[in-house]
Image (cartoon, rainbow, N blue to C red):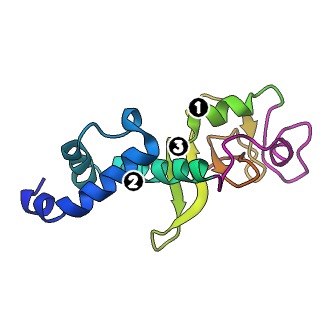
Amino acid sequence: MNIDIQDNNRKSDILEYRKIVDVLGVEKSPISLNEFQDLKYNDVEKYEKLVDKTFIQNKFNTGKWLDKVNPEKQARHIQSTAEKGNSYFFDDVDVEALYDKYKQTSKFRRTRKGRNEENYEIINLPDNLKIGKDAYTGEYINGFTIHYSKTGSHIIPTYHRKER
């Protein structure tokens, strides 16, 4: 890491680090300011995930989003109750467990200009999981999008091409 950049941004980095610790708690935050700065300036992907995780947790903490699956919204994406044309999870899939396992683990969908779309977290799944079908391709899903909202979250199964 360029020491000059670290020193020049120390004040703003301290404020950002404190906010992350306040929102996520000590156990889910980088151990020290130095570790935080190392992440910020040397591992952009992990830094963006940390920023997104903090954003989500802050929304939960302030009550702007509800941290549970909304069964009514989720029913649209379960095989036995999905409308024609909707991607779905098979009926035996525990969607609540998927949500609990994968929430706050990835990055938000971004616009072409790199702006956060605010409530859509994109999750990639291992290719060997066969837990649902994509409506557009007919393929088994290889990911899903978590949609966060005030009335609860729901996850939308999807198939997307992965870069190799």
- Observer-nearest of 161 and 112: 112
Residue, disc 1: 101
Q: Amino acid at mark 2?
A: Glu
Discs 1, 2 touching: Cβ within 8 Å: no
- Observer-nearest of 73 and 114: 73
Q: Is residue 44 visible?
A: no
Please give the name of the residue rendered at 57% of the width and 37% of the height, measured from the top-left corner: 102
Q: Which residues are magenta?
A: 63-90
Please give the name of the residue rendered at 11% of the width and 60% of the height, measured from the top-left corner: 7
Figure check: 111 above or below 94: below
Q: Residues within 10 Å of mark 1 (few under 14, many from 20)?
A: few
Disc ID at residue 104: 3
Residue, disc 2: 48
Q: CA distance from mark 2 to mark 3?
A: 11 Å
Q: Residue 131, position in %: x, y? A: 71, 31
Figure check: 111 above or below 102: below
Q: Residue 134, position in %: x, y? A: 74, 46
Q: Quadrant of residue 41?
A: bottom left
Choose the circle earlier in sequence order: 2 or 3. Answer: 2
Q: Quadrant of residue 109?
A: bottom right
Q: Is residue 66 visible?
A: yes
Q: Amino acid at mark 3?
A: Gln
Q: CA distance from mark 1 to mark 2?
A: 19 Å
Main secondary structure along the magenta-highlighted residues: loop
Q: Residue 11, position in %: x, y? A: 20, 62
Could you say whether the residue bearing mark 3 is in a helix, strand or loop? Answer: loop
In the displayed structure image, the side of residue 43 where residue 148 appears, left or right: right
Q: Residue 112, position in %: x, y? A: 49, 72
